[in-house]
Amino acid sequence: MASTSNTEHAFLQFALDAGVLRFGEFTLKSGRVSPYFFNAGLFNSGATLSTLASFYATALHEAEPASFMLFGPAYKGIPLAAATAVALANEYQRDIPFAFNRKEVKDHGEGGQLVGATINGNVVIIDDVITAGTSVRESVDIIRAAGGTPAAVIIALDREEAITQDGLGAIDFVTDEFGLRVHALARFSSLMDFLAGKPELASEFQSLQDYRAHYGSVKTVR
């Protein structure tokens, strides 16, 4: 999904309608004050999760034609992995195994840290966003320790913000650091295009433009 597409705009409209994409002033974990916020935890009904999973399934079916399995990092990645596996089976007849981790290792019953299918072969990590890359690093370590090969990451939104002193965005950092393919259902730049076509959101467009000038990754602002 390298260029802005109707699919990206459809996803952004869906996120806006669901209240997942919001505009205002939001203090992020990094301390930055953002004019928008994307809270994937608000995809919290059967209908919205089903639609979200369909977007993920379509993106994965197009971007990852070879065999793979899904890994959902706790906690947000768990429902994403399960729902997307269902969507891939129902919509594309691809029976994709999935697994996820526990935050704490279980010391009774079946025990261990992992739940679901045995991790092996190429593994795609599914999550909502990438910020500093910490979650990806943890997932890569878990997958490798279990005998799998981390191959790609798919997220809902690429904020295209600089996270390194060199101005690299999270996706560029993950690609360089781990050699993973990274797919996003939508990007900050496509959000800008989306807002440009909505006069009623003109004030938000200007705020996002200013935010990009301050915090955009080197590839975004040049």
Image: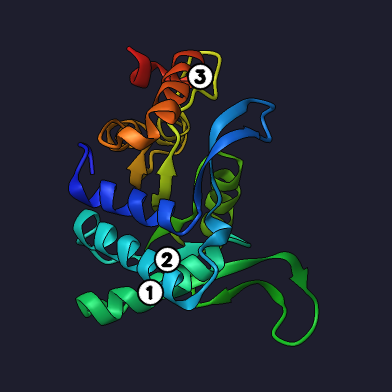
Regarding residue 110, the answer to whether it shows in the image is yes
Q: What whole-number distance in Å separates the C-alpha atoms at marks 3 and 1?
A: 35 Å
List x then y, in percent, for residue 31. 69, 27
Q: What whole-number distance in Å separates the C-alpha atoms at marks 1 and 2?
A: 8 Å
**Residue at x-position 38% and y-position 43%:** 180
Q: Are marks 1 and 2 in contact (CB under 8 Å)?
A: yes
Q: Amino acid at mark 3?
A: Tyr
Query: Picture quarter containing residue 197?
Result: top left
List x then y, in percent, for residue 168. 45, 22
Residue position for label 3: 215
**Residue at x-position 36% and y-position 15%:** 221
Residue position for label 1: 85
* 86 over 180 or under it: above or below: below
Residue position for label 2: 70
Secondary element under disc 2, as helix, strand or loop, is strand
Residue density around tag 1, few if under 14, some if 14–19, many if 20 or more, within 10 Å: many
Query: Picture quarter containing residue 213?
Result: top left
